[in-house]
Amino acid sequence: MNLMTALMTAVWNVPLKAYFDPWAIPPGVWVIFGVIGLPVYTAFLGWFIGKPRDLKTLALGSTLFLLFVSALWGGLFVTTMQIRLLFF
């Protein structure tokens, strides 16, 4: 048995329930991504679905949006790791 076959067999036999249980996710995550994020998702989709479409503005807005979100998540991650190191 070659390596690819062994990897495919290992991946195929992994039960999904062991790795992803949507009810094990804390309710706050559902609130943040579902309820609070809904207007943001709507505005973001409006850039793609709405008219008039300007590809240059669409690319600029999407890039800035993704950079902003990445900066926020990155900053929160760094802050969380500092709090973890200092207090726990």
Image: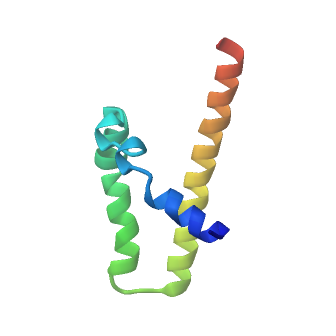
Of the pair 18 and 12, the residue shown nearer to us: 12
The location of residue 85, given as percent across then percent down, is 71, 20
- Does residue 37 sit above or below 11 in this rendering? above
- Does residue 84 sit above or below 34 in this rendering? above
The location of residue 86, given as percent across then percent down, is 71, 16
Which residue, as the protein is rendered here, is positioned at the far top?
Answer: 87
Residue found 68% across the figure and 35% down from its top: 78
- Does residue 62 sit above or below 74 in this rendering? below
The location of residue 4, given as percent across then percent down, is 62, 70
- Does residue 8 sit above or below 77 in this rendering? below
Q: Is residue 79 visible?
A: yes
Q: Can residue 64 be seen in this view?
A: no
Residue found 52% across the figure and 70% down from its top: 62
Apparent side of residue 37 relative to residue 3 in the rendered image (left or right): left
Apparent side of residue 40 relative to residue 2 in the rendered image (left or right): left
Rendering quarter of residue 63 = bottom right
Rendered image coloring scheme: rainbow
Rendering quarter of residue 43 = bottom left
Indicate the quadrant containing the N terminus: top left, top right, bottom left or bottom right.
bottom right
Residue found 55% across the figure and 53% down from its top: 69
